[in-house]
Image: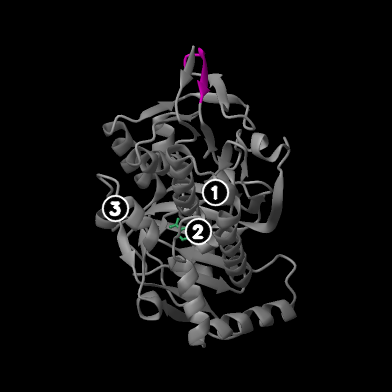
Amino acid sequence: MTERTRVAIVGAGPAGLVLSHLLAEAGIDSIVVDARGREEIEHTIRAGILEQGTVEVLDGIPGSRARTVGQRHDGIELRFAEPGGEAQGHRIDFADLVGRGVWLYPQHEVLRDLIAARLAAGQDLRFGATVTEVTGVDSARPTVRGARADGTPFEIVADFVVGADGSRSVVRPSVTGDSRSGGYFREYPFAWFGILCEAPPSSEELIYSNAADGFALISQRSETVQRMYFQCDPDTDPNALDDAEIWERLQARVPGTRLAEGPIFQRDVLRFRSFVSHELRRGRAALVGDAAHTVPPTGAKGMNLAIADVLLLADALRRLLLEDDPRGVDGYAEAASQRIWKAQHFSWWMTSMLHVAPDASDFDRRRQIGELRSVVESEAGRRYLAEAYTGWPLRAAV
Ligand code: PHB
């Protein structure tokens, strides 16, 4: 059976769900499909930092708990030592430098709020629906085909198709015309070993630590659960280390702080990739979020960049579908790219400044400490970091 909607959104992550909300507010109906089940979406552990602008967007969605349950952070700490010296923490005071902050509120909680809100609003939201084909993006009737959870085929004819379906996007090839990666790509020679543990917080704010044998990030989840990461080889098997070895690595990488230890109940290895799709829009299809780009997690930009894309695209679609004005859609790729490449740079810069490359020479290490000093000892340096981390102003496409 062929179904009809105005916007077919592939992917029920933050990008797809926020887009369906913004379109509904404008009176534009959409169908959201996702190959995953609701349980899986609501339980996948992802990062947790929301820019102030992202929280403001979520505030507009009924039932969002980002501002109330999430914790506001007005700064982060960068920690490093001169070679052979004692490590010192340097606070980047966001409130003082840019008058803005960020919220620590995990992505799966954002997703629980969004799914509940969209279902309550009567959104057509389908889990377990796998897309196999997107056709007709160069026509006025792009079409999404696939199979529902029970195997029955579906076909959705739309005015516009949006790929919000993550880094392994099935919509992307119809936009780039390339079944391979179709993008600018960079891989890094390290990854993060991430844990969730039952313990009280070890620090009030996040600590980004550059230690002689590698990076560590001390983050949080709640009064009783903490999230921490340490730099590791990308081929590390998450089950190869026992709890004692993990704590030993973490402790060694935040010299000067005694981490509160506790049972580790989740561990994962996150590979680092920077990717931007060569094309973000073709005809009546566009990409948003991780389908369009991925960033390494050091700059905490992933979900925020997805929301920034969606604000641009929602406005562009409103103009196209309600006013028959194609300029927003025509300008989408260029407008989105500007922020995407700033975020790519920031994420790459934080990553390269804070991690120790496996082949780093003494020159490289000393230069890196010089770079960190240049940032923390200069108000302009600290302000750049604060501006980027808390998020550049959000704007609509021209
Ligand atoms: C996290 O809490 O998972 C987190 C925080 C900051 C980052 C990355 C991850 O830069």
Give the foreground label among 3 and 1: 1
Image position of 323 with respect to 254: above or below: above
Q: Residue drawn 59% across and 85% down?
A: 82
**Badge 3 amino acid:** Asp
Q: Residue drawn 34% across and 70% down?
A: 204
Judging from the image, what secondary structure is the residue with disc 3 in?
Answer: helix
**What numbered label is drawn on residue 327?**
1
Q: Residues within 10 Å of mark 3 (few under 14, many from 20)?
A: some
Judge whether residue 253 can be spotted in this image: yes
**Badge 2 amino acid:** Lys
Q: Residue drawn 44% across and 41% down?
A: 323
Image position of 368 with respect to 341: above or below: below
Give the foreground label among 3 and 2: 3
Depth check: 182 or 268 in front?
Answer: 182
Query: Residue 78: horizontal and vertical position, in percent?
Result: 49, 75
| Disc 3 and disc 2 in contact, CB within 8 angstroms | no
Give the labeled residue for mark 3. 59
Depth check: 355 or 83 in front?
Answer: 355
**Badge 1 amino acid:** Arg
Give the labeled residue for mark 2. 301
Image: magenta residue range? 149-157
